[in-house]
Amino acid sequence: MADAKFIPFEPHFEALHKPIVRRPWFPSRIARSSSRRYASTSPKSPKPSPLKDPIPLPKSPLATRHRSSGLRSTETYIAYGITKKLFEACSAQADYKIPQISQKGAEIPKTANGEDLGVGEGWWYEELGLLPTFSSWSQVTFLHMYLVTVRLRALPSPESFQTFARHLFDHFSNHAEDRMDVMHGIVSRPIRVKYLKDLFIQWRGVLAAYDEGLVKGDAVLAAAVWRNLYKGSYTDAQGRGEDVDWNNISQIVLYMRKVLTELAPLEEVSMAHHVGGEKGIFRSNQRVDKLVELDARGIEEPFLQESVEKEAPERT
């Protein structure tokens, strides 16, 4: 074997130079030229017609319905996350605590109306004179939810707005029920459900009252703030017997106007990142007391009967 001479691939090269001979087992019909016109390469053969676009199949109503359902499901998840962040920012504005919860046997102080009185800090309690109660928290939260809702009304479609609005109030309902149970000891589920129904009715009233105020002017808006936040009382919320400070209500009206102005250009996706926090839109617009104390431009102008007649509308 050692003396054998091995030449690689030589037999294969010899086979390449051998003439091709028709094998007896090779079918003759395969070797013949085809009579089909597209198999011929003759210039006289007709050219094949150009390919046409396929006729689109009719859309299935079921497939369309499933696709739209999928889009709505995706939007629902997005709306849930965005509104959760927005609600957390709204709820934090007038948050309060009840220290007696962690103290066994401690009695929770009450207001003159019998509400549980907690401990709260911030602009709404320290400067505007509201009491840190569940009622104050819910109404201040409603006010900020309303400001967010006004911006959400600019969504591309009514269906999108309804999705966002529904999730926003659902977050409030879940949080409010948890607060009733943990902080106020309302362990009965039917009682909590009854209170939640009352809160939903209040929410509908808040939407109508503040909408009317935005359209008809600051005086109507101030009256709505007075009814909702100060319960329509002519005396202060602290129970000192003093008259309600209308300067505080004016600050709230100006605060609402400024927040709505800054929310208008924001995208709904990024809105949650701009409203909360110490430097957010809510907190940064709470220092409006100096603007309210400024006199109106026309307060020092002399009173003229002619100017009143010109401004008065003509009666027909």
Image: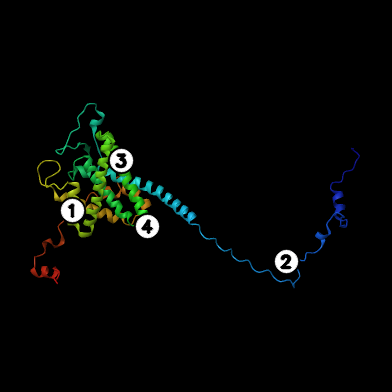
* Circle 4: residue type: Ser
Q: Position of residue 157 (x, y in %)?
A: 37, 57
- In the image, which is nearer the foreground, mark 3 or mark 1? 3
Q: Which residue is mark 1?
A: 222
Return the disc, 4 or 3, that comes first in the chain's sequence. Answer: 4
| Distance in Å between CA atoms under marks 3 and 1 | 28 Å
Label 3 sits on a secondary structure element that is helix
- In the image, which is nearer the foreground, mark 2 or mark 4? 2
Left or right of 133 on screen, residue 162: right
At 11% from the left edge and 69% from the top edge, which residue is drawn? 307
At 29% from the left edge and 39% from the top edge, which residue is drawn? 177
Left or right of 124 on screen, residue 52: right
Colour style of the rendered protein structure:
rainbow
The image quarter in which residue 215 lies: bottom left
In the picture, the disc for residue 175 is 3
Label 1 sits on a secondary structure element that is helix
- Measured along the vertical axis of the image, is residue 75 above or below residue 95? below
Q: Which residue is mark 2?
A: 38
Q: Which residue is mark 4?
A: 157
